Amino acid sequence: MTNNLKNKTWNEIKSNDSWAIFKIMGEFVNGYEKLSQIGPCVSVFGSARTKPDQKYYKLAEKISKRIVENGYGVITGGGPGIMEAGNKGAHLGGGTSVGLNIDLPFEQHDNPYIDNDKSLDFDYFFVRKVMFVKYSQGFVVMPGGFGTLDELFEAITLIQTHKIDKFPIILVGSDFWSGLVDWIQKTLLDTFQNISGPDMDLVQVVDTEDEVIEILNKFYGEYNLSPNF
């Protein structure tokens, strides 16, 4: 009796896993259809916990406004904190403001600065991350937590392994990022040789909106704007 119950439960799990494929496919199809129409965009990442009165919220807002004024749209994770600042800056600049939302405990809710027709909801992190990379012409990475680091290192890995074309990855805030960059240089590269020298050039650390725009415009003065993958 016990074995039958175990087998039934295991069979139900396998069946549910199989049907989940269609839900995953649906998220990919919906994402591709909507995002393929938005034009060149830059993804802005950072902590959902950053408050509107904090300096990096204000800086993310300024950067995003400048991004849309230079002809790009802005994609964020659609939630509060730095994501809200990114969408707010894009909205104030009169540009494209996209939100890729996902349901998370305690911190995720839609912010009011996303264009009405450019708010997408996801259940799967991996589908959402594909959309960030495929439809972004660059990553502007503000101070954040584990989620921000996850998105940052996935992009670096995809570029390092030539799974996608290179695009600018800009870390904003030397007071936040310098320790990590130093550790990568001294530990991963110098001590253990787990990466190669050119890998250090995949990211740039800046402190101002002018530097962000200069990097983006210089890069796309030499390369075409096109989807990745």
Image (cartoon, grey):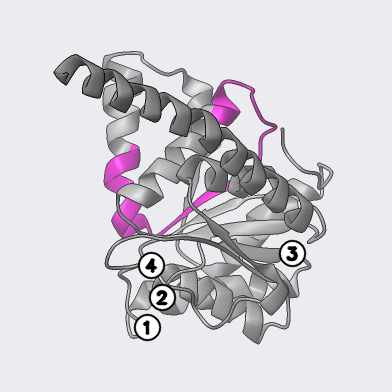
Do the residues under discs 2 and 4 have CB atoms within 8 angstroms?
A: no
Q: Position of residue 116 (x, y in %)?
A: 68, 78
Comparing 160 with 154, the one in front is 154
Disc 1 marks which amino acid? Answer: Pro
Look at mark 2 in the image and give the residue it sits on: 57
Disc 3 marks which amino acid? Answer: Tyr
Q: How many marks?
A: 4
Residue 185 in sight: yes
Gap between marks 2 and 3 measured at Cα:
20 Å
Crowd around label 1: few <14 · some 14–19 · many ≥20 (10 Å): some
Disc 4 marks which amino acid? Answer: Gln
- Which of discs 2 and 4 lies nearer the camera? The answer is 4
Gap between marks 3 and 1 measured at Cα:
23 Å
Element assignment for label 1: loop
Name the side, left or right, on which 46 lies relative to 76: left
Q: Earlier in the sequence, mark 2 or mark 3?
A: 2
- Which of discs 4 and 1 lies nearer the camera? The answer is 4
Q: Residue at x 48, y 51 (%)?
A: 123
Crowd around label 2: few <14 · some 14–19 · many ≥20 (10 Å): many
Disc 2 marks which amino acid? Answer: Tyr
Do the residues under discs 2 and 1 have CB atoms within 8 angstroms?
A: yes
Do the residues under discs 3 and 4 have CB atoms within 8 angstroms?
A: no
- Start-end of magenta stretch: 158-181
Image height of 5 relative to 20, above or below: above
Look at mark 1 in the image and give the residue it sits on: 52
Do the residues under discs 2 and 3 have CB atoms within 8 angstroms?
A: no
Look at mark 3 in the image and give the residue it sits on: 72
Q: Position of residue 229 (x, y in %)?
A: 72, 32
